[in-house]
Image (tube, rainbow, N blue to C red):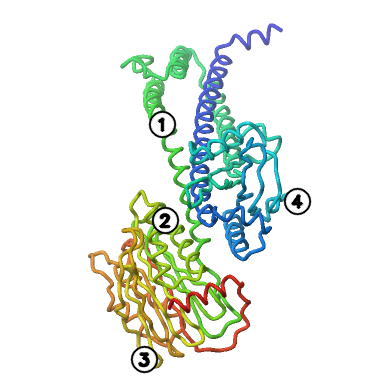
Amino acid sequence: MKKYERLFESLNFRIISYVLVLLILFSSLVGYIGYTRFTTGMTAAYSETMLKTAETAAATVNPDRLQAYLDNGGADADYRFTNGMLDMLCQKQDFTFIYAYCVDTTDYNHYTIVFNAANQNSGYAEDDIWTIGHVQETRNDEYRQVYRAFYDGTLSHKTILRTSNLKGAEPFIHTMIPLKGSDGTVKGVLTVQAEMTELNHGRYSYLQLIAAALVFCAMIASTAAHYYFGRRIVRPVKLLARETLRFAEENSLAPEGSLKSLSDIGEIRILASSIGRMEEDTLRYMENLTRITSEKERISTEMALAARIQASMLPSDFPPFPDRNDFEIYGSMHPAKEVGGDFYDYFMVSKDYLALVIADVSGKGVPAALFMMISQILVQNAAMAGLSPGAVLETVNQQLYQQNPEEMFVTVWFGILDLKTGDLTAANAGHEYPMLKAPGGVFETVRDKHGFVLGGMPSLRYKEYQMKLEPGSTLFLYTDGVPESTDNEGHQFGLAQTLEALNRTPDASPVQLLRNVEEAVRTFTGDAPPFDDMTMLCIHYNGPQLSSGEAVSEASEEGMEQTQQTV
């Protein structure tokens, strides 16, 4: 017993104990700060991303038709198209659910499902996924109050997070926004739900790192205290230990000069000086750690999610229609930053009519990417509604102008190609001139009619024009990031060099033509950083040929008939 008492009373034991306590306190403080900041940053990033996605999903739903969908059980083509868009967004974003429903406003205690897109990898059984017409009881008073506030017009959105008391489940988040009809009244509610798997994984990894660092530091400190214990060292070390403990408790610098007079031993003077510098560095480190960690995690998470969202919105499977041989098409988009504001798109609006889109949003980065996704969806929705190119641009311009507080705009070239005749009807909203190669010829610039950019002014009209694509013709579309690419001296690539790159092998396939332009731009710019997003779309028309493509829906056929009449 006395042996253990002497051990506990020994200075060596106490120094080792003090060092260990200090390390534990410091590690706990750093761990707590990092843990809370990481959680706050991640949940903030999730909340913002969920809100933007909910707004994007809501843009695809027509609130005025929610009751009609319920009445016909979702049997019309418009319902299937909207449900398909929500399902695609749910899968691409890897969310758990995206669902829209009508709330019983008598007591806000029940709601009826209209749309319900569920992630195929969510782990929910098929019987657990609600179908159209399913009536579900509201979970609790919190949700009832949210619904009441939506319908009263006092709440624009609500995000609910569950990060504790999960009983083994992953943390999850869901965002709700009201669906307002054309008369301004709320017709229903849209909810986006996702699991925050990265939150748990990141927190566990961080705590493991702190624990490993604590164990390592404890071993080093114990060994040093044991071997350097001595009479001339004990007193100054005790004073240094006390100073260290004082700093841990007060987080303030030692009085000036107090650490330099502790001992005449050089190593101890260096240690005292190092502790002084450690105190200064630690205070700066603790101040910067919370700010840098939170900012870095927030930016990294936002940019990664934004890049994945944008990539999922652009066509990337080539050839896109392997059962068709009447045309070849290829597109590419290279953002100047992590995400860009350019986009290209193509889709069949009918069996023999192909829509072509290329656009450039003002600005760069995340705001431009979000505006780009909204613009892409609005253009596709208007085209699938059977509008002509000019009417599509007029409709999208009005929609963007009405909800554009940041005063952003987008240039768009939009055309519809008759694959049987090669007749192309197009309209240009302030975009670059297209380039066309006739059979046996070379690429030339088509000086088409320009209208004003979309989102800049209300109630604009856009003129349409026609082009004839003979069998063997090739159409090249691009954004200003191609001709305005600059080298280190500020010289621009230009339209002339763009035509030259295309005409080196004018009869090449679309994919080879785009590679030729990209290679020419890289050679010209060298190691200069990208000036702007570089986006291109190229189509080669082979002429009318038999195709085994999938039949389009009745709604798309009717919409194309309206387009033919308008054109």
Residue in view at x 31 percent, y 58 percent: 457
Q: Quadrant of the N terminus?
A: top right
The amino acid type of the residue labelled 1 equals Tyr
Foreground label between 4 and 3 = 4
Where disc 2 sits, the SS reads helix
Compare marks 4 and 3 and give the one earlier in the sequence: 4
Where disc 1 sits, the SS reads helix
User: Can you tell which mark lies on residue 394?
Assistant: none
Compare marks 2 and 4 and give the one earlier in the sequence: 4
Foreground label between 4 and 1 = 4
Q: How far apart are the two marked residues, 1 and 3, measured between alpha carbons?
A: 66 Å
In the rendered image of this protein, does residue 164 appear above or below residue 79? above
In the rendered image of this protein, does residue 4 appear above or below residue 458? above
State which quadrant residue 258 falls in.
top left
Foreground label between 2 and 3 = 2
Q: How far apart are the two marked residues, 2 and 3, measured between alpha carbons?
A: 38 Å
Q: Which residue is the site of mark 4?
A: 125
The answer, for residue 233, to whether it is visible in the render is: no
Q: How many residues crowd around disc 1 within 10 Å: few (fewer than 14), some, or many (20 or more)? A: some
Q: How many residues crowd around disc 4 within 10 Å: few (fewer than 14), some, or many (20 or more)? A: few
Q: How far apart are the two marked residues, 4 and 3, measured between alpha carbons?
A: 59 Å
Q: Which residue is the site of mark 2?
A: 371
List x then y, in percent, for residue 325. 56, 85
List x then y, in percent, for residue 365. 39, 54
Q: Quadrant of the C terminus?
A: bottom left
User: Can you tell which mark lies on residue 285?
Assistant: 1
State which quadrant residue 480 falls in.
bottom left
Extreme residue toward the bottom, this view = 440
The amino acid type of the residue labelled 3 equals Gly
Compare marks 2 and 1 and give the one earlier in the sequence: 1
The amino acid type of the residue labelled 2 equals Phe
Q: Which residue is the site of mark 3?
A: 441
